[in-house]
Amino acid sequence: CGTLAVLEQTEAGIVLLKSFDWNDGLFDVTWSENNEHVLITSSGDGSLQMWDTAKTKGPLQVYKEHAQEVYSVDWSQTRGEQLVVSGSWDQTAKLWDPAVGKSLRTFKGHEGVIYSTIWSPHIPGCFASAS
């Protein structure tokens, strides 16, 4: 099982704001650029989960298209586009629009497990993946 813990540093120390449990290990997490309460995690069951820290239960949505563990997830830092990229042990990266509810495109070409995906902070629409 995995746990998403949302922590905040205060003058009194680090405080647990919210905690959510998932039925498999959680490997990565990324915040929405447009909503301070929304984030996405990636999981060992091949899915992504969208959570809202303003809600008591979650997740808001589950995206399951990868065939193996999703080890990396990153939300675009360009506020004009709401895109998420994920990288999986199935050797694919997927591009997501959380509002659509399914992937927009699958990128193949890696010959090994993808361990990291990240959006460029400088070039809109550009991401990198590493395996």
Image (cartoon, rainbow, N blue to C red):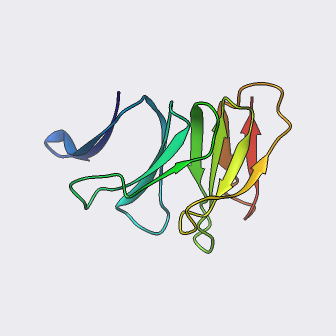
In the image, taking residue 28 as reference, residue 57 lies left or right, namely left
At horizontal 63% and vertical 40% (from top left) the residue drawn is 66
Residue at 75% in and 45% down: 128
Q: Residue furthest left?
A: 12
Q: Quadrant of residue 69?
A: top right
Identify which residue, 82 or 49, lies in the foreground.
Answer: 49
Q: How many marks?
A: 0
Describe residue 60's horizontal placement relative to residue 48 as left or right.
left
Give the camera-side residue of 36 and 69.
69
- Viewed as shown, does residue 120 lie left or right of 9? right
Q: Image quadrant for the C terminus? A: top right
Relative to 21, is 83 above or below? Answer: below
**Where residue 42 sits in the image (x, y, percent)?**
51, 40
Estimate the x, y position of residue 103 in percent, counting from the top left: 65, 56
Q: Residue furthest bottom?
A: 80
Q: Residue furthest right?
A: 109
Please give the name of the residue rendered at 65% of the width and 30% of the height, measured from the top-left corner.
115
Q: Residue at x 62, y 75 (%)?
A: 80
Q: Nearer the viewer, residue 75 or 48?
A: 48
Q: Quadrant of the N terminus?
A: top left
Residue 81: where, in percent of width, then height? 63, 70
